[in-house]
Amino acid sequence: MHFLRFSDLCASDKVRGRRVFIRADLNVPLDDDGNITEDTRIRASLPCIRMALDAGAAVMVTSHLGRPAEGRLEPQDSLAPVASRLSELLERDVPLRANWVGGVSVQPGELVLLENCRVNVGEKKNDESLSRAMAALCDIFVNDAFGTAHRAEATTYGIGQYAPIACAGPLLAAEIDALTQALAQPARPLAAIVAGSKVSTKLSILQSLAGKVDQLIVGGGIANTFMLAAGLPIGKSLAEPSLVEDARAVMASMKARGAEVPIPSDVVTAKSFSADAAASTKRAQDVQEDDLILDIGPETAGRLAAQLKQAGTIVWNGPVGVFEFPAFENGTRALAQAIAESNAFSIAGGGDTLAAIAKFGIEDRVGYISTGGGAFLEVLEGRTLPAFEILEKRAQEA
């Protein structure tokens, strides 16, 4: 897709002296005392902010935080902790402005943080009058919030319609580039790992990928449903028998293209779902009625790992076992290690996937780690995200 990049505007000196409005994703977790417990999203937003300041812009940044009620700012919804953390990281004062839709005073070289955008009435419904009012605040709108790219809201879509210039920040541009490389122009073979507790939550993703990928690895409760579809016993494992026919349809779609959904040949089971449950490795056909399947077995893990090492592109969403429990982490560890060792371009997304990447220490060996869970999943479903749509439309008009 074609879109304007903020980095190109900065490089061509089209930003100096301009008012720049950055929609960032600063929705960080807070403890009960309002302290930030994890600041990855703030750190990820710094390159765009620094880029704007270095280019001589008057910089406004906003984000949502939590789930505030429109029209009312409660203390727990304030971006005050984010302003403090930004001040520390940027080593400069970052004033926080409330009630900013009617006007913001900011000079070139200055930076202000605009209070929680979802407090504004009409934000979530992409109200036109609100969008126009925000667009009037700036000369350049920069969307750098991939985590909200699947939502058509006033600060993610509406302002992009009416701002004089609308472009993608470095974080959003990197996401678009990585997703394009992985899905639109992939090096083959293209392998996808889709795992989770339920087929129903990712059925549309599986159906979409079945027409694109060369290998579709399923894991977790999803794999159990596919094992049922293949005629294998799963004991009392989590599964959705009502979706067995859908699973068979996905398998048939893959087979018709000469591709496959690999079914586990061995599994790791337990009698209860707990960290200290005794693990037992057995052939897939030998699963007993009182067994819970909590991981793929070493034979399956080895076979899948070997295939991943031969892939040209890997898309990863979800661990293949209960990796939080040491006895059932080996399948996910084996695939993570294979991805790290592969020469393929790899892209990973989703909270559990990121947790697995961190646990197994392969952050530096994954091609791209996506920052947006819901947005990442919607791209895998084959949807066009609203934020992408408006930036592409504005680029065509430019």
Image (cartoon, rainbow, N blue to C red):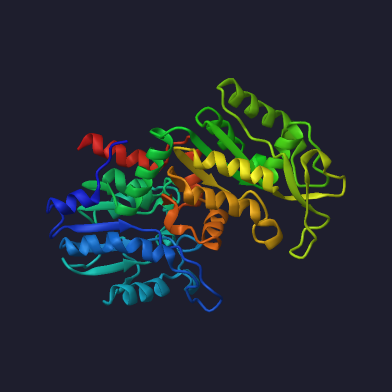
- Of the 4 image quadrants, the one containing the N terminus is top left
**Residue 274 higher or lower than 379, as above or below:** below
Looking at the image, residue 34 sits to the left or right of residue 43; the answer is: right
Looking at the image, residue 243 sits to the left or right of residue 189; the answer is: right
- For the image, the number of numbered tags is 0
Tell me the residue at 20%/69% (across/down).
110
Furthest toward the bottom, the residue is 33
- Of the 4 image quadrants, the one containing the C terminus is top left
Tell me the residue at 41%/70% (across/down).
79
Task: Find residue 198 and report its horizontal and vertical position in percent.
Answer: 67, 44
Q: Nearer the viewer, residue 87 or 362?
A: 362
Q: Nearer the viewer, residue 48 or 276?
A: 276
Q: In the rendered image, which quarter is residue 247 located in? A: top right
Looking at the image, residue 182 sits to the left or right of residue 210; the answer is: left
**Residue 246 higher or lower than 21, as above or below:** above
Tell me the residue at 70%/45% (across/down).
221
Furthest toward the right, the residue is 289
**Residue 245 higher or lower than 101, as above or below:** above
Q: Nearer the viewer, residue 160 or 239?
A: 239
